[in-house]
Each structure stands twice: as structure tokens, then as C-alpha cells.
Amino acid sequence: MKNTIKKLILSSVFILLLSTHTVGYGQGMPVYDNTNFISLAKSLIESAKQTSQLLKTVQFLKTQKENIEKVNNVVKQLKAVRELTRNNQRLFDIVRNDLRTILNSPYIKPEEITRISNSFNAIVESSLEDLDYISQILSSYSLKMTDAERAEILKEKELNSKEMVAEIEQKTKRYRDIISFREMQSKINQRETNY
């Protein structure tokens, strides 16, 4: 009996010690699951790979955007050169055809022929100077210019050529009006009166 009481007391003390030990720590020592850590590391590595790919894609797209802008500037330059060529062709056609008609008219006075010729020649010379300048801009890369600056200058010269064509057309119309007025005046002065 003494032995049983000793066993009972020892077992109750042991139970008390175990119960106080587990109450202070909850469920015991935490256990770490290494599989979660490994999957986290794998997902971080995968995210880094995707970020790296995204950065490469962004760089590629920036390069493509620059290439598209270069092509766009070249297309603008070509359109401007084509328009300049049309305007200058129109200018030369007007001078070649209409100026000859105006100067051969009997209603233009001899002292006016020089003034008319000089007026038209000044416009043609200005047009030729613009063409030489444009040729230098397009063919010489020694000039420190970007494609955008070249396109801007070409656009400006295109507008100048349109103004020259308009000026030539206006002068041609004015001289034709003068010729027609003088012709009508001559007919009126030469008619026979039946008074």
C-alpha cells in the first residue's frame, strides 16, 4: 500500500509537471515545414525570371518605337521632297509657258519686259537655291541634324515653294489681266464710230 501511495503521488506530480509545462507553451515547440519555404523560393525565382523578361520586352519595345519614329521621319521627308518637286515643276511650267505668252504679247511695252523677266527670274532663282540647300541637307550627313530637324526644314521649304507658286500664279494672272485690259482698250480706241 505504501508503494501504491508512492506511485500515485509520483504519477500525480508527474501529471502536474507535464500539465504546467504544456500550459505555458501551448502546443509545444513549433514545427517548420520546409516544403513551404522551398515553394516560396521557387515562386520568387520564377517572379525574378518574369521580371527579367518584362525588362527585356520593355527595352525591345523602346528600340522598336525609336525605329518607327525614324521611319516616320523618313516618310515625312519623302513626302515633303515629293511636294517640293511638284511645286517646283509647277513653277517651272508656269514660267516656261505663261511667261513666253506674256512677253510675246504686243500689249506689253518693251520697258516692262525687263521688269517682268527679272521678277520671274528672282522667283526661279530662289527656288533653285532652295533645291540646292535641300540637296545638301539630304545628302550630307556632316551637318549635325536629327531626322526631325531635317523634316522640319523640308516642311518649311515646302511651304516656301507653295508660296512661290502662288506668287507666280498671281503675277501671271495680273499680267494677263493687264494684257486683256490693254487689248480691250486698243479695240475700243480703234473702233469706227458711226455718228
Image: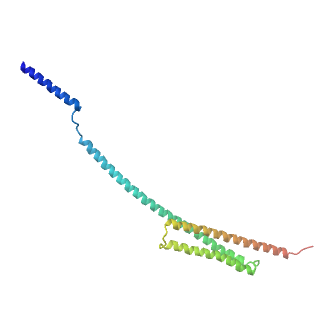
Residue 25 lies left or right of residue 142; in this view the side is: left
Residue at screen point 68% across, 78% down: 117
- Tell me if 150 is positioned left or right of 55 in this view: right
Which residue is located at x 60 percent, y 67 percent? 159
- Which residue is drawn at the image coordinates 57% and 66% (left, top)? 155
Q: Residue furthest top?
A: 1
Residue 161's quadrant in the figure?
A: bottom right
Q: Quadrant of the C terminus?
A: bottom right
Residue 7 vs 116, above or below: the answer is: above
Q: Is residue 180 in view from this perspective? A: yes
Residue 160, image x, y percentages = 61, 69
Left of 44 or right of it: where is 190?
right
Counting from the top left corner in percent of width and height, residue 147 is at 49, 66
106 up-or-down from 150: above or below: below
Seen as rendered, the residue at the extreme left is: 2
- Name above or below for residue 149 compared with residue 111: above
Residue pictured at 47% horizontal, 64% vertical: 70
* Rendered location of residue 151, percent (x, y): 53, 66
Evaluate whether residue 83 shows in this view. Answer: no
Q: Quadrant of residue 120?
A: bottom right
Q: Residue placed farthest to the right in the image?
A: 195
Q: Quadrant of residue 96?
A: bottom right
**Picture coordinates of residue 89 (x, y %)?**
61, 72
